[in-house]
Protein backbone atom coordinates (compact mmCIF):
# COMPACT_ATOMS: atom_id res chain seq x y z
CA UNK A 1 0.00 0.00 0.00
CA UNK A 2 1.13 3.53 -0.76
CA UNK A 3 1.76 5.81 2.16
CA UNK A 4 0.10 9.23 2.20
CA UNK A 5 2.05 11.60 -0.02
CA UNK A 6 4.19 8.81 -1.46
CA UNK A 7 2.99 9.26 -5.02
CA UNK A 8 3.59 6.84 -7.86
CA UNK A 9 6.29 4.32 -6.99
CA UNK A 10 8.57 2.96 -9.75
CA UNK A 11 8.85 -0.58 -8.38
CA UNK A 12 5.05 -0.90 -8.24
CA UNK A 13 4.23 0.74 -11.57
CA UNK A 14 3.56 -1.69 -14.41
CA UNK A 15 1.19 0.29 -16.66
CA UNK A 16 3.83 2.62 -18.13
CA UNK A 17 7.58 2.59 -18.80
CA UNK A 18 8.33 5.97 -17.21
CA UNK A 19 7.18 8.25 -14.42
CA UNK A 20 7.86 11.92 -15.19
CA UNK A 21 8.09 14.90 -12.85
CA UNK A 22 8.46 18.40 -14.31
CA UNK A 23 9.89 21.23 -12.25
CA UNK A 24 7.52 24.03 -11.24
CA UNK A 25 7.28 27.02 -13.60
CA UNK A 26 8.76 25.01 -16.50
CA UNK A 27 6.66 24.99 -19.64
CA UNK A 28 7.75 21.92 -21.63
CA UNK A 29 6.82 23.58 -24.94
CA UNK A 30 9.26 26.42 -24.13
CA UNK A 31 12.19 23.99 -23.80
CA UNK A 32 14.41 23.37 -26.83
CA UNK A 33 14.70 19.57 -26.70
CA UNK A 34 17.92 19.56 -28.71
CA UNK A 35 19.61 21.94 -26.24
CA UNK A 36 18.54 19.90 -23.22
CA UNK A 37 20.63 17.16 -21.68
CA UNK A 38 20.41 14.75 -18.78
CA UNK A 39 22.31 13.19 -15.93
CA UNK A 40 21.83 9.41 -15.84
CA UNK A 41 21.65 7.61 -12.52
CA UNK A 42 21.63 3.81 -12.89
CA UNK A 43 20.37 1.85 -9.89
CA UNK A 44 19.61 -1.66 -8.81
CA UNK A 45 15.83 -2.20 -8.69
CA UNK A 46 15.76 -2.41 -4.88
CA UNK A 47 17.20 1.14 -4.63
CA UNK A 48 15.06 2.94 -7.21
CA UNK A 49 12.04 3.90 -5.08
CA UNK A 50 14.05 5.71 -2.40
CA UNK A 51 16.26 7.40 -5.01
CA UNK A 52 13.28 8.49 -7.10
CA UNK A 53 11.57 10.02 -4.09
CA UNK A 54 14.64 12.21 -3.45
CA UNK A 55 14.91 13.29 -7.10
CA UNK A 56 11.15 13.78 -7.50
CA UNK A 57 10.83 15.89 -4.35
CA UNK A 58 13.85 18.04 -5.19
CA UNK A 59 12.58 18.53 -8.74
CA UNK A 60 9.22 19.66 -7.31
CA UNK A 61 11.08 22.17 -5.13
CA UNK A 62 12.87 23.55 -8.20
CA UNK A 63 16.26 22.47 -6.83
CA UNK A 64 17.38 20.29 -9.74
CA UNK A 65 16.80 20.62 -13.46
CA UNK A 66 13.75 21.19 -15.63
CA UNK A 67 12.40 17.65 -15.35
CA UNK A 68 13.17 14.13 -14.16
CA UNK A 69 11.95 10.69 -15.10
CA UNK A 70 12.44 7.17 -13.81
CA UNK A 71 12.04 3.75 -15.38
CA UNK A 72 9.38 1.55 -13.84
CA UNK A 73 8.71 -2.13 -13.21
CA UNK A 74 7.05 -2.50 -16.62
CA UNK A 75 9.42 -4.69 -18.67
CA UNK A 76 10.97 -2.45 -21.32
CA UNK A 77 12.35 -4.03 -24.50
CA UNK A 78 14.73 -1.03 -24.79
CA UNK A 79 16.46 -1.85 -21.48
CA UNK A 80 19.93 -3.35 -21.68
CA UNK A 81 19.85 -4.95 -18.23
CA UNK A 82 17.79 -5.21 -15.05
CA UNK A 83 18.93 -1.88 -13.60
CA UNK A 84 16.61 1.10 -13.41
CA UNK A 85 17.54 4.61 -14.51
CA UNK A 86 16.66 8.10 -13.37
CA UNK A 87 17.18 10.94 -15.85
CA UNK A 88 17.61 14.45 -14.46
CA UNK A 89 17.23 16.95 -17.29
CA UNK A 90 18.88 20.35 -17.63
CA UNK A 91 17.61 23.05 -19.99
CA UNK A 92 20.85 23.70 -21.91
CA UNK A 93 23.84 21.37 -22.15
CA UNK A 94 26.00 24.36 -23.12
CA UNK A 95 25.27 26.02 -19.76
CA UNK A 96 28.05 24.23 -17.90
CA UNK A 97 27.45 26.18 -14.69
CA UNK A 98 23.84 24.96 -14.52
CA UNK A 99 24.75 21.40 -15.55
CA UNK A 100 27.34 21.24 -12.77
CA UNK A 101 25.01 22.95 -10.26
CA UNK A 102 22.53 20.11 -10.83
CA UNK A 103 25.34 17.55 -10.46
CA UNK A 104 26.43 19.12 -7.18
CA UNK A 105 22.85 19.08 -5.86
CA UNK A 106 22.59 15.39 -6.80
CA UNK A 107 25.80 14.78 -4.87
CA UNK A 108 24.29 16.57 -1.84
CA UNK A 109 21.26 14.28 -2.13
CA UNK A 110 23.55 11.25 -1.85
CA UNK A 111 24.28 10.40 -5.51
CA UNK A 112 28.04 10.25 -5.12
CA UNK A 113 28.83 7.46 -7.58
CA UNK A 114 30.25 8.36 -10.97
CA UNK A 115 27.41 9.26 -13.35
CA UNK A 116 27.25 10.33 -16.98
CA UNK A 117 25.64 13.24 -18.78
CA UNK A 118 24.17 12.96 -22.29
CA UNK A 119 23.09 15.66 -24.69
CA UNK A 120 19.60 15.06 -26.13
CA UNK A 121 20.73 15.98 -29.64
CA UNK A 122 22.96 12.90 -29.78
CA UNK A 123 20.26 10.71 -28.27
CA UNK A 124 17.85 11.84 -31.00
CA UNK A 125 20.42 11.09 -33.69
CA UNK A 126 20.84 7.58 -32.29
CA UNK A 127 24.52 8.14 -31.55
CA UNK A 128 24.46 6.57 -28.09
CA UNK A 129 22.97 3.36 -29.40
CA UNK A 130 25.92 2.89 -31.76
CA UNK A 131 28.78 0.85 -30.40
CA UNK A 132 31.58 2.94 -28.97
CA UNK A 133 29.63 6.15 -28.31
CA UNK A 134 29.74 7.11 -24.66
CA UNK A 135 28.25 9.89 -22.63
CA UNK A 136 29.19 13.52 -23.24
CA UNK A 137 31.06 13.55 -19.93
CA UNK A 138 31.27 11.88 -16.57
CA UNK A 139 31.27 13.37 -13.12
CA UNK A 140 32.46 11.56 -10.02
Image (tube, grey):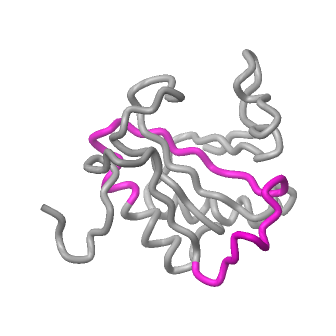
Q: Reply above or below: 4 against 120.
A: below
Residue 55 in the image: x percent, y percent? Answer: 46, 63
Residue appearing at x 78%, y 57% in the figure: 33
Residue at far top of view = 131
Magenta span includes 31: yes
Magenta span includes 12: no
Residue at far front of view = 15
The answer to whether 62 appears left or right of 93 in the picture is left
Q: Reply above or below: 31 against 62.
A: above
The front one of 137 and 8 is 8
Write down the quadrant of residue 24 in the picture: bottom right
The answer to whether 80 appears left or right of 33 in the picture is left
Q: Reply above or below: 51 against 113.
A: below
Residue 13 in the image: x percent, y percent? Answer: 31, 50
Residue 29 in the image: x percent, y percent? Answer: 75, 70
Residue appearing at x 64%, y 41% in the figure: 116
Residue appearing at x 19%, y 76% in the figure: 4
Tally of numbered discs: 0
Write down the quadrant of residue 130 in the picture: top right
Residue appearing at x 50%, y 60% in the figure: 20
Residue 10 in the image: x percent, y percent? Answer: 34, 51
Q: Which residues are magenta?
A: 24-52
Amino acid sequence: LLQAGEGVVPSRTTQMYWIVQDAPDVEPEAVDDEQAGKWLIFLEPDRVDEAWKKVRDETCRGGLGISARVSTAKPNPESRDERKVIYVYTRDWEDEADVMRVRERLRELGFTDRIGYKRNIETYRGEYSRKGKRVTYYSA
